[in-house]
Image (cartoon, rainbow, N blue to C red):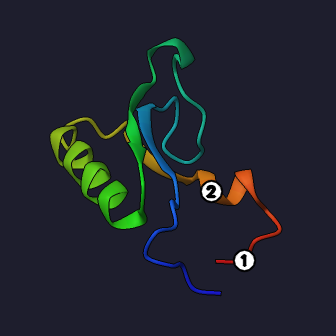
Amino acid sequence: MTAKKDDQLIHLVFGGELDDVSEVKFKDLASLDVVGFYPNYASAHQAWLGKARETIDNAQMRYFIVHLHRLLDPAKDD
């Protein structure tokens, strides 16, 4: 099933400093950076890219895109 123009495919962009780059375990959960919520992947990707570029000098810093719409309705295949 393809997404309709009016569908909100909510995405979360967040990140933080990792203990070890070989796994996703954050140094301090209280200091996670919640960049924001976005209505589609394209805008979430733009936000992710901006944050990734901002923090490029810190090898431990990672940002992620979470497809919240998939968690909210896992039976719906998009």
| Above or below for 38 versus 45 | above
In the rendered view, does 1 fall on the left or right side of 35? right
- Residue found 43% across the figure and 37% down from its top: 14
User: Can you name the residue that lies furthest to the right here?
Assistant: 75
Measuring from the top left, give residue 43's x and y in whole percent: 30, 59
User: Can you name the residue that lies furthest to the top here?
Assistant: 30
- Residue found 83% across the figure and 68% down from its top: 75
In the rendered view, does 31 fall on the left or right side of 70? left
Q: What element carries label 1?
A: loop
| Above or below for 16 versus 13 | above
Residue on which disc 1 sits: 77
| Above or below for 60 versus 78 | above
Callout 2 amino acid: His
Q: Do the residues labelled 1 and 2 touch (CB within 8 Å)?
A: no
Callout 1 amino acid: Asp
Q: Is mark 2 on a helix, strand or loop?
A: helix
- Residue found 43% across the figure and 76% down from its top: 5
| Above or below for 57 versus 4 | above
Residue 49 image-quadrant placement: bottom left
Q: Which of the image's four quarters has the N terminus? A: bottom right
